[in-house]
């Protein structure tokens, strides 16, 4: 992929995650929500997955929810940030943590029974390419289960920055684009997965002030890493314009502001002969006309 087609500065993504290592557990509510929901989805699958990969493991929060469930005996925790992995919680052995970039997976083909990911895949430049790699490292009939921010995430913050910049120096991207749930299923199919299912859930969080939201995003390692954004410190005047618009347009009668997180879940399987197959075109024996009579 040429530089012209890149969205994110992966070095900045890594820097933000390294910087967040000491503070991530203080504002990990979003990861907690994702981990709990992934664990619930996994619990509905009546299968065992002895060897699993947690891709983009952060501080290992997901391990607390899924290790030992569904027959998971070994969970490899992988993240591009060594600092985050060093702060990994109880639940994974030190020798099962691997520093790896989600865009260049170092794992052998047909290695894992399960690949899970919570809140990391939205930072890759080539999501279809990463999904192809995930498919490759799964064993046949292996499960891929991930959750990532969707298109409506931080829509209030995005709108507030857009209005502020139009009043000041012109538009510059400040909030990342996120995957649309309607496109996610076709991305899974393009990557060679079988039985893809995608859905989204909305989580609305209240904050006392927009600066508290920005503070939490920074401590999550979710600060702006867009290549096309303006470099350097944000002008104080622009920040104040953004805050003014946010407070005016997205606050409740008590003065609390809302922040939307659109959580998109991807579920798919690596193809295997044992899986249910769609009926061959033209093989139906019942007339639709007869059924409608």
Image: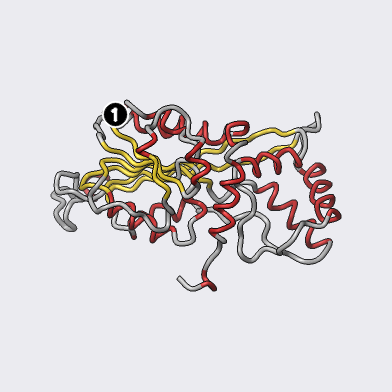
On the rendered image, what quadrant is the C terminus found in?
Answer: top left
Crowdedness of circle 1 by 10 Å Cα count: few (<14), some, many (20+)? some
Image spot of residue 27 (x, y percent) = 62, 33
Query: Coloured how?
Result: secondary structure
Q: Give whichever of 79, 140 is nearer the camera.
A: 79
Task: Provide the residue designation for mark 1.
Answer: 70
Question: On the picture, is 24 further left or further right than 281?
Answer: right
Q: Is residue 293 visible?
A: no
Q: Give whichever of 157, 235 is nearer the camera.
A: 235
Question: On the picture, is 78 further left or further right than 50?
Answer: right
Q: Is residue 277 visible?
A: yes
Q: Quadrant of residue 164?
A: bottom right
Element type where label 1 sits in the image = helix
Q: Residue at x 64, y 66 (%)?
A: 228
Q: Number of labelled discs? A: 1
Question: On the picture, is 35 further left or further right than 141?
Answer: right
Image spot of residue 90 (x, y percent) = 44, 27
Q: Residue at x 56, y 46 (%)?
A: 17
Image spot of residue 271 (x, y percent) = 22, 50
Answer above or below: position of 190 versus 242.
below
Answer above or below: position of 76 versus 136.
above
Image spot of residue 185 (x, y percent) = 39, 52
Q: Quadrant of residue 133?
A: bottom left
On the rendered image, what quadrant is the N terminus found in?
Answer: bottom left
Q: Residue at x 28, y 46 (%)?
A: 269
Q: Give whichever of 215, 205 is nearer the camera.
A: 215
Q: Residue at x 48, y 73 (%)?
A: 2
């Amino acid at each position: 992929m040429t530089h012209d087609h890149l969205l994110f500065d992966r070095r900045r993504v890594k820097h933000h995650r390294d910087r967040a290592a000491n503070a991530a557990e203080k504002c990990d509510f979003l990861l907690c929500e994702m981990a709990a929901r992934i664990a619930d989805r996994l619990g509905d699958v009546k299968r065992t997955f002895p060897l699993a990969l947690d891709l983009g493991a952060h501080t290992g929060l997901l391990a607390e929810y899924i290790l030992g469930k569904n027959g998971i005996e070994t969970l490899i925790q992988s993240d591009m940030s060594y600092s985050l992995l060093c702060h990994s919680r109880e639940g994974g052995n030190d020798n099962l943590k691997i520093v790896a970039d989600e865009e260049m997976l170092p794992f052998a083909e047909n290695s894992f029974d399960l690949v899970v990911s919570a809140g990391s895949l939205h930072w890759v430049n080539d999501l279809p390419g990463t999904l192809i790699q995930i498919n490759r490292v799964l064993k046949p009939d292996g499960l891929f289960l991930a959750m990532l921010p969707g298109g409506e995430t931080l829509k209030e913050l995005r709108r507030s920055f857009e209005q502020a910049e139009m009043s000041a120096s012109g538009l510059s991207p400040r909030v990342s684009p996120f995957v649309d749930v309607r496109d996610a299923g076709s991305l899974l199919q393009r990557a060679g997965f079988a039985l893809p299912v995608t859905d989204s859930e909305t989580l609305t969080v209240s904050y006392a002030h927009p600066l508290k939201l920005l503070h939490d995003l920074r401590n999550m390692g979710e600060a702006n890493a867009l290549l096309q954004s303006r470099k350097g410190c944000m002008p104080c005047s622009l920040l104040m314009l953004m805050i003014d618009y946010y407070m005016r347009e997205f606050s409740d009668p008590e003065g609390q502001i809302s922040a939307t997180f659109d959580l998109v879940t991807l579920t798919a399987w690596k193809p295997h002969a044992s899986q249910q197959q769609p009926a061959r075109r033209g093989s139906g024996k019942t007339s639709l006309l007869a059924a409608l009579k």
